[in-house]
Amino acid sequence: MKKIIGSLALVALLTACHAAPAGSPVGNASVTISPRVIAGERTTQAVVNPLTAASIDHLTLKLYKMDGATENEKASKDIAGPIGSQTVSFGNLAHDSAYRIRAFAYATAGTSDPISVDADSLLDFWVEVDNEIALPAVPVQLKNVTFSGTSNAAGLAVTNGDLVYSGSEAIN
C-alpha cells in the first residue's frame, strides 16, 4: 500500500513539474503574418494623390518581445514592393510571452523617412503554448499627403498648408 501511495505521489510531482515552465524559455511557437496596407487620405480639395500600396518600395516587419512596456527587438524581415499578399514567418517564440510586430513602409531604398504612421502600424499578440499562431494582417497605415504647391502668379504664394495673398484681389 505504501508503495502505491509513493508511486502516485511521484507521478503527481513529475506531472506538476512538467506543467509549470520556468520563465519564458524559447519555444517552438511560430507566427505567419501578412501586411494590410491602409492608404493615406486626401486632406484638401486640391488633387492630391494619396500614398497607396503601390507607393511602397519595401516594407520592414520587426518582431519585438515585450517586457512590460519595453520593446526588445528579436527579428526583422523585409518584403520587397509591390506589396500584395506576401507573408512573413517568425519562429522560436517563447510561450507565456507577449510580442509586438511593427511595420515600417518606405517609398525608396534604405530605412530613412518611412511613409507609414508608426503609432498605427503595429499588432500585439500573446503566445500561450508551442503552436502555430493565427493572427490578422498587420496594419500598415500610410501617412496622409498634404497639398504643397507654388505659383508664378504675381502676389500669390502657396506653401505647405498655407495660402498667402498680397494685393487688392479677393479670393473666394
Image (cartoon, helix red, strand yellow):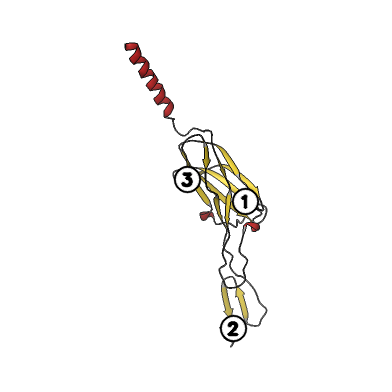
Mark 2 to mark 3 CA distance (whole Å) = 52 Å
Residue named by callout 1: 59
Left/right placement of residue 78 relative to residue 127 reads right
Q: Position of residue 130 (x, y in %)?
A: 50, 34
Q: Residue 22: name its quadrant.
A: top left
Q: Position of residue 59 (x, y in %)?
A: 62, 51
Q: Position of residue 66 (x, y in %)?
A: 48, 43
Q: Residues within 10 Å of mark 1 (few under 14, many from 20)?
A: many
**Nearer-the-camera pick, 86 or 124:** 86
Label pair 1/2, CB-CB below 8 angstroms: no
Mark 1, mark 3: which one is toward the viewer? 1
**Nearer-the-camera pick, 96 or 147:** 96
Residue 70 marker = 3
Q: SS at mark 3?
A: strand
User: Given the image, on which type of amino acid does mark 3 rest?
Assistant: Thr
Left/right placement of residue 7 relative to residue 81 reads left
Give the residue furthest to the bottom: 168
Label pair 2/3, CB-CB below 8 angstroms: no
Q: Say above or below: 151 vs 146.
A: below
Question: Which mark sits nearer the N-terminus, 1 or 3?
Answer: 1
**Nearer-the-camera pick, 157 or 45:** 45
Mark 1 to mark 3 CA distance (whole Å) = 23 Å
Question: Which mark sits nearer the N-terminus, 1 or 2?
Answer: 1
Q: SS at mark 2?
A: loop
Q: Residue 15: name its quadrant.
A: top left
User: Given the image, on which type of amino acid does mark 1 rest?
Assistant: Leu
Residue named by callout 2: 166
Mark 1, mark 2: which one is toward the viewer? 1
Q: Quadrant of the C terminus?
A: bottom right
Q: Residues within 10 Å of mark 2 (few under 14, many from 20)?
A: few
Q: Say above or below: 73 vs 140.
A: above
Give the residue displayed 58% in from the left and 78% down from the top: 164
